[in-house]
Amino acid sequence: MNKVLITFSLLVLQAATLAAQELNAKVVVNHQQVNSTEQAIFDELQNKVQAFLNERNWTGLTFKELERIPCSFNITVNSYDQSDGSFKCSLLMSSTRPVYNSTYTTPLYSIKDGDFNFNFQQTDQLEYSGANNLSSNLVAMLAYYAHMIVGYDLDSMAPLGGTDVLHAAEDIVTYAQDLGYNGWKAFDDGKNRFALLNDYLDGAMEPYRQMVYKYHREGLDHMADNPEEARKAITESLTMLDEARTAKNMCHLPQLFSEYKRDELVNIYTGHGTSQEKQQVVEILNRVDMSQSATWEKILK
């Protein structure tokens, strides 16, 4: 009986641990550009990064298994030096969010990081114990993106809901600047990790964060039961996107949003809504990203 009770207790503990984790990440390491016979190092990197992202609680919040956030980390190895384990890579990271009362999932956050560079040996263990104790640039970048994914997701569920998690990402940026890698410092690049998070948390960009909530929670989540009201909320959210663009016109976030929401936005309005509403949306999106004007014109059909 005692053995049964112990086994049951361990199973309960294991289930509770699994329920606490926030991410459901799929990691792919593409090394086709690298001439190397060391297949094992790339397999080990892929397996350890995926385990690192999925097998820990990043925020102290409890997520049920079905609530874990689907996300993908596609790492392209541009060069690899076996002698010191240095990798120069690019990362394409994206996360999605289920839409209530539907089988549809919407892109929530997507970014390409061209400075995804680090050192990694096959025997390395990826460990994270806080922003002030970063063991490597790989750990710092993965921890940063884990917090960004959760922060965006929480912002889409409640107004400014991800603030605490995003401030934790901000701490990672602060301490990671001492690691000596690109992507962490102000003024290096207007689209790097520092810049995008700094802009996102800037008070002038609060309309953008409020837009994330309104677009998803008041818009998409009601598309199945009340499409007219849902589309109206999405249109209102796009005026907030425009407001954010005006408030900080050098910020890349509004354009980034339009890039990964492009096809979705076209589908929302094509054949739906009034001519006036669609014209308003097209004018806003052209101000956000004129390079996509041919795509935005499809909304008017």
Image (tube, rainbow, N blue to C red):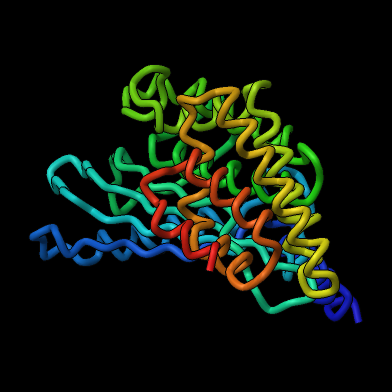
Specify the quadrant of the image occupied by residue 295. Answer: bottom left
Q: Position of residue 138 (x, y in %)?
A: 39, 41
> In the shown orientation, is residue 275 left or right of residue 92?
right
**Residue at x 58% of width, y 69% of height:** 270
**Residue at x 32% of width, y 61% of height:** 29
Q: Position of residue 152 (x, y in %)?
A: 65, 45
Q: Position of residue 25 (x, y in %)?
A: 53, 62
Q: Is residue 212 above or below residue 53?
A: above
**Residue at x 54% of width, y 60% of height:** 71
Specify the quadrant of the image occupied by residue 6. Answer: bottom right
Specify the quadrant of the image occupied by residue 180. Answer: top left
Task: Looking at this view, name the residue that lies furthest to the left.
Answer: 35
Q: Nearer the viewer, residue 60 or 14?
A: 60
**Residue at x 67% of width, y 54% of height:** 276
Q: Position of residue 154 (x, y in %)?
A: 73, 47
Judge whether residue 118 can be spotted in this image.
no
Q: Nearer the viewer, residue 288 or 93?
A: 288
Judge whether residue 7 can be spotted in this image.
yes
Q: Is residue 66 above or below residue 277?
A: below
